Image: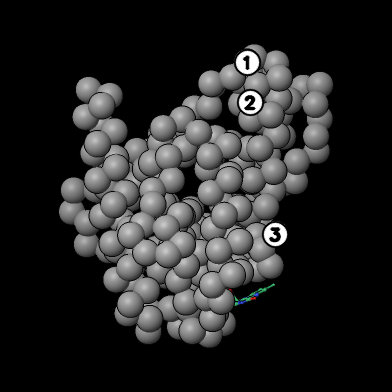
Amino acid sequence: MKILGIVGSNRKNGNSYLLLKEMLKNLSEIETKVIQVAELDIKPCKLCFEVCSKKPFECVIEDDFTMLFEEMKSTDGIIIACPFYFYIPSKFQPFLERLSCLDYFTEEKHGKGLSPLAGKPCALITVSASASSFNAFQLLHHLQEFALMLHMRPITTNFWPFIGFSAKSGDIEKGTILREKKAIEQAKEILKLLVMEIEKRGRVLD
Ligand SMILES: Cc1cc2nc3c(=O)[nH]c(=O)nc-3n(C[C@H](O)[C@H](O)[C@H](O)COP(=O)(O)O)c2cc1C
């Protein structure tokens, strides 16, 4: 089983990254990979509609977008860990733009039902200093919309707001999240749910 973690923060090795690493620690039978958009070059969408998605979900801009999208396609489950930066960090936003544009023009030019991520389980995690529930909910809701647009299967939790998890980093400095034991516990619970969903999907596909 392979799980890909995508960190949406503008800064490397920040709280979202540290939470994700903590979640994925000591997993013996699961292959994990974490990619930080802070380390990538992903340019904004140019809305070049004539050439966009000539082939389904194919973007003509050459940068790290393709690599990240390929990683998403080839994994069994995805965790998106994204900090609240009112709302989406600007390094992550171009990735969402590009995929949403590919989704739109693929459907226009080739028809429905072609998302290569369809049915893929994903877990959505937001991180903010105070986890003000309303802000965190808005960001989770946005990420959920993104996942659903691509026909992914966001897992739900047993606690509010159910569509993912909003972790509190306590402060803005890198590392403060590691003091938040409850947040780490809850994030690990979500990982269990994600693994269960991947296993269930595997059985359905067998
Ligand atoms: C532009 C911007 C706006 C932010 N707004 C909020 C906010 O409204 N509420 C909050 O709790 N934290 C807010 N934060 C703090 C981050 O969400 C927080 O520091 C988080 O731990 C950063 O995660 P990272 O290290 O993964 O980037 C904001 C940060 C930035 C850069």
Say few, some or many: other residues with alpha carbon within 10 Å of mark 3 (under 14 / 14 to 19 / 20 or more): some
Name the one closer to the observer, 193 or 82.
Answer: 193
Q: Where is residue 204 in the image (x, y as percent from the top left)?
A: 25, 26
Q: Residue furthest left?
A: 28
Horizontal placement of 87 versus 74: left or right? Answer: right
At 27% from the left and 47% from the top, the residue drawn is 195
Looking at the rendered image, the disc whose residue lies closer to the viewer, 3 or 1, is 1
Looking at the rendered image, the quarter that the N terminus falls into is top left
Identify residue for label 2.
58
The amino acid type found where label 2 is placed reads Glu
Name the one closer to the observer, 71 or 177.
Answer: 177
Say few, some or many: other residues with alpha carbon within 10 Å of mark 2 (under 14 / 14 to 19 / 20 or more): some
The amino acid type found where label 1 is placed reads Gly
Ligand 1 quadrant in view: bottom right
Label annotation for residue 141: none
Identify residue for label 3.
90
Label annotation for residue 111: 1
Question: In the picture, residue 38 is in which quadrant?
Answer: bottom right
